[in-house]
Amino acid sequence: MFPALLFLRTHGMNLFETLKNQFPVLCDPASAYIYLDSAATALKPQTVVRALAGFYTQNGASVHRGIYNSSIQATKQFENARKKLSVFINAPTADQVIFTSGTTASINMLAQSFAQNQLCAGDEIILTLLEHHSNIVPWQIAAKKTGAVIKFARINKNGTLDEQHLESLFGPKTRLFACTHVSNALGTVNPVKKLTALAHSKNVPVLIDGAQACTSGKIDVQDIDCDFYAFSGHKMFGPTGIGVLFAKPHWLKTLQPAFGGGQMVETVTTQGFVPLPAPIGFEAGTPPIAQAIGLGAAVDFINEIGIDNITAHTNTITALAIAELEKLPDITVLGPKTGTGPVVSFVQEGIHPHDTAAILDSEKIAVRAGNHCCNPLMQALGTSATVRVSFSVYNCLDQIQNLCQALGKARDMFKG
Amino acid sequence: MDNQAKLYQSVIIKHSKHPYNFEKPDTFTGHADVQNPTCGDKMSVYLTKTHDGTTIQSVHFTAAGCALCVASASIVCRALENTTIKDAQKLMGQCRDFIAGKSTQNIPEDFLAFAGIEAFPSRVKCAELVFTGIEKSL
């Protein structure tokens, strides 16, 4: 039996004590630190590292085209990973799961495909002020190419989406609504099912940026009913360089591939090409084979623990973090205080976030400070930067105490 | 240096909390807005030359940045007051070398507090933002 599951069944919910031992980077005493930056990237469990290394040491062949056993086996593993991912997000079929290099690549690919045959001058794309730059800049590039216009839905003072304002933005020229599932900067969880229904009621397709959502709860693209869902492997314990774009069949038939090359074509002549059907038709070139297999192992890791157990654990830590940080006289927590993903943003009075983060680093606590690739959101919040802490299965409640003590050291250092 | 906290010496904290010439003056002869894209620090530099254009009379600045960024600007603005442009450029070159860990010659005393910053490349960018601002204002 998987060690984590065995421990859970015999020792209850103490996820941290069992799981931290499965993350090699946390087991090296020489590099021991408290990692509170999982929103940037999650650390990797041994099973994922082993799956990656296993592919390179035991196989190493390319997929789909080889007429030899190791290539056939590599293809099976690669396509098996796709199947696991489709089940993970409850996609109706594995063919709707396109492998990309990450969320950013997924959104760029979609934006470029939209620019080819879906957008005209004057058409409108609706985004929100909660977006990461990766769900803004690709659309700005597409808008520049086509003459389309981007509109931003505002946020409320507490960092939630202003749904009334969002609704007012839809019009006859709206061609797409794209929004984040969970804000990487504030942890705000958008009601994506409700927002998708709103957009669909205006005949507007929906892209959900799920980069931060895949360990914040069960992802069910059929329940959300979104047209597209993008996410990254590395934020859900998988390798870097692998991500997914889910799309509904209608769009897979309608959209033209953004990238061309080997593997994705049925025929090529001097006159042109005929792409293969999805998903291969959208996966030009040799795909990230080892990374896909590693991501499959990450899905197994999540499933073994149970996404509900993971969410319960990180929700408990997040709630404690917000409560303890708010007790500190010089800390202001930004964003919603309840119902968030495992992300907490704050500022320390009189100390720039970079300085706070640098002093926390000296106390062996890794946090993120800056604008979190969310300049429009920071402008809306009236700040240029925040300190962000984010949590995962390898974090524990005690670490919040460590964090608060280290913040006290920063406070003392800047006194006077 | 393996500990960023060691950078936060009292002289740097003092300059960051009470920066020299931290205001937009009524008049100035050169101005630049600069930004560190890595971390988002922003600075506006206002430079005033003498009538003959050979000497820096004063340098003022405003900034939204970390302690290292503001302290560096405070120290440099004071050091460059009433300095010929030629000497100012030389001094800024020496300071840039210092925070790159290359040289310690002719460094303003307070600026010596940045010793060891070269171990943290992202923080070097904080300390050198003021040089970019001044060079663009000249």
Image: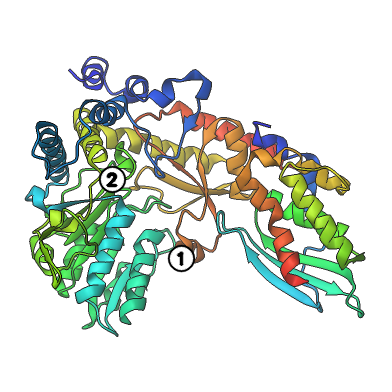
Pointer 2 and pointer 1 on the same chain: yes
Task: Quickly name the residue at label 2.
Answer: A242
- Viewer-proximal residue among A105 and A370: A105
> Mark 1 belongs to which subunit?
A
Left or right: where A69 falls relative to B36: left
Left or right: where A236 falls relative to B66: left
Residue in the picture at 23% in, 52% down: A285
Q: Quadrant of the N terminus of chain A?
A: top left
Q: Quadrant of the C terminus of chain A?
A: top right
Label 1: element kind: helix
- Viewer-proximal residue among B24 and B32: B32
Count of labels in the image: 2
Task: Quickly name the residue at label 1.
Answer: A376
Callout 1, which amino acid?
Answer: Pro
Task: Tell me residue A280's x, y (percent).
Answer: 14, 53
**Residue B107 vertical placement versus A398 (above, below):** below
- Viewer-proximal residue among B70 and A247: A247
Task: Tell me residue A217's x, y (percent).
Answer: 24, 43
Label 2: element kind: loop
> Mark 2 belongs to which subunit?
A
Residue in the picture at 12% in, 41% down: A66
Q: CA distance from mark 2 to mark 1?
A: 27 Å
Q: Earlier in the sequence, mark 2 or mark 1?
A: 2
Q: Nearer the viewer, mark 2 or mark 1?
A: 2
**Residue A312 vertical placement versus A185 (above, below):** above
Residue in the picture at 27% in, 81% down: A123
Colour pattern: rainbow
Task: Tell me residue A345's x, y (percent).
Answer: 47, 48
Characterize the local packing of mark 1: few (<14), some (14-19) or many (20 or more) Cα atoms within 10 angstroms: some
Characterize the local packing of mark 2: few (<14), some (14-19) or many (20 or more) Cα atoms within 10 angstroms: many
